[in-house]
């Protein structure tokens, strides 16, 4: 078989990274000093790593996170009330394997959404499927889906995700219909998958979020009893995002 035939077959099989690596090796004389086994192992490894990275990229993209959050960027200031050992335990993904939940509460700007998304991104990097939603957006999408016959498809997608992140929980009161939708989604996932809930409101006040108290009790019972509770504290982290120029300007206005 000729070199050109080999290139064509690799392209036809869509082994593009192997093809590219093989071409690069042909142009690099240092590879002639290596055994065939080492050369072949390198070619296969490049294809393997590329496919794994592409799979991770697709999983993160499909999750629709708002930001590329990473666990190694988490801030552990003492006033945040965030336990480093607990986060490292989450990084083992045992909570996902055990179908447990995580509830993150705290004031605006304390990094709740970032932590939830960092946990989701980390899981995606290790082969899990995640989905991120602001709760109001999810409810709007479910309502719209009933008009275009995509409701069951969305419900099935949510049920299959290893992790469902529900952000801005409690931002608005859930009426009878919305509360029922959320109760059904939580029921679908109970004992099979994991959910991360992010809220400004303490767990003990969640019964006021639902218009129907019976639905509130059912949802809270299914979420809380198999959930790790994290209550973030401290000042807003968003002030750290301001430029020095803006901070200087604000300081000058106070003089």
Image (cartoon, grey):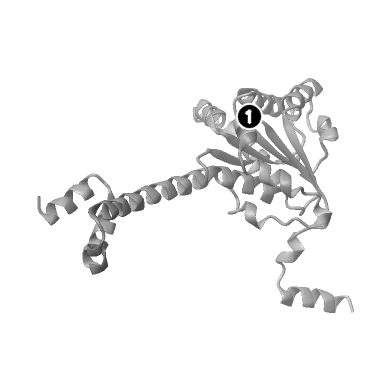
Q: How far across and how far down the image is residue 91, in percent?
A: 63, 44
Tell me residue 189's x, y (percent): 61, 26
Residue 130: image x %, image y %? 56, 39
Left or right: 51 in relation to 129: left
Which picture quadrant has residue 146? Answer: top right
Which residue is painted at 60% across and 36% down in the image?
163
Establish if 165 lies above or below 44: above
Residue visible at 60% across and 29% down in the picture: 193
Depth check: 224 or 172 in front?
224
User: Hey, which residue is sitting farthest right in the picture?
Assistant: 255
- Residue 223's quadrant in the figure? top right
Q: Quadrant of residue 203?
A: top right
- Residue ID for mark 1: 99
Q: Is residue 53 left or right of residue 187?
A: left
Which image quarter holds the C terminus? bottom right
In the rendered image, the vertical position of residue 79 relative to residue 90, given as above or below: below
Which x, y percent locates residue 39? 27, 55
Residue at 26% in and 60% down = 34
> What element does badge 1 sit on?
loop
State the residue lying farthest toward the left: 1
**Residue at point 68%, 33% (across, down):** 101
């Amino acid at each position: 078989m000729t070199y050109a035939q080999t290139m064509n077959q690799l392209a036809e099989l869509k082994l593009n990274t192997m093809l590219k690596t093989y071409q690069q090796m042909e142009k690099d004389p240092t590879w002639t000093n290596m055994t065939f086994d080492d050369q072949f192992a390198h070619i296969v490894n490049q294809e393997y790593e590329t496919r794994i990275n592409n799979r991770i990229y697709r999983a993160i993209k499909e999750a629709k996170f708002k930001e590329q959050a990473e666990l190694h960027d988490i801030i552990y200031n003492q006033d945040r009330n965030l336990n480093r050992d607990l986060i490292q335990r989450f990084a083992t993904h045992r909570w996902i394997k055990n179908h447990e939940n995580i509830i993150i509460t705290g004031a605006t700007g304390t990094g709740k959404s970032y932590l939830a998304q960092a946990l989701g991104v980390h899981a995606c990097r290790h082969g899990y499927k995640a989905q991120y939603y602001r709760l109001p957006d999810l409810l709007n999408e479910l309502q719209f889906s009933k008009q275009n016959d995509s409701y069951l498809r969305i419900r099935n997608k949510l049920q299959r995700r290893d992790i469902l992140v529900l952000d801005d929980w409690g931002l608005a009161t859930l009426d009878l219909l919305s509360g029922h939708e959320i109760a059904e989604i939580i029921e679908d996932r109970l004992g099979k998958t994991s959910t991360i809930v992010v809220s400004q409101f303490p767990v003990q006040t969640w019964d006021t979020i639902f218009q129907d108290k019976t639905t509130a009790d059912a949802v809270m019972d299914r979420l809380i009893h198999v959930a790790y509770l994290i209550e973030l504290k401290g000042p807003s982290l968003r002030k750290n995002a301001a430029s020095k120029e803006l901070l200087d300007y604000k300081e000058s206005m106070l003089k």
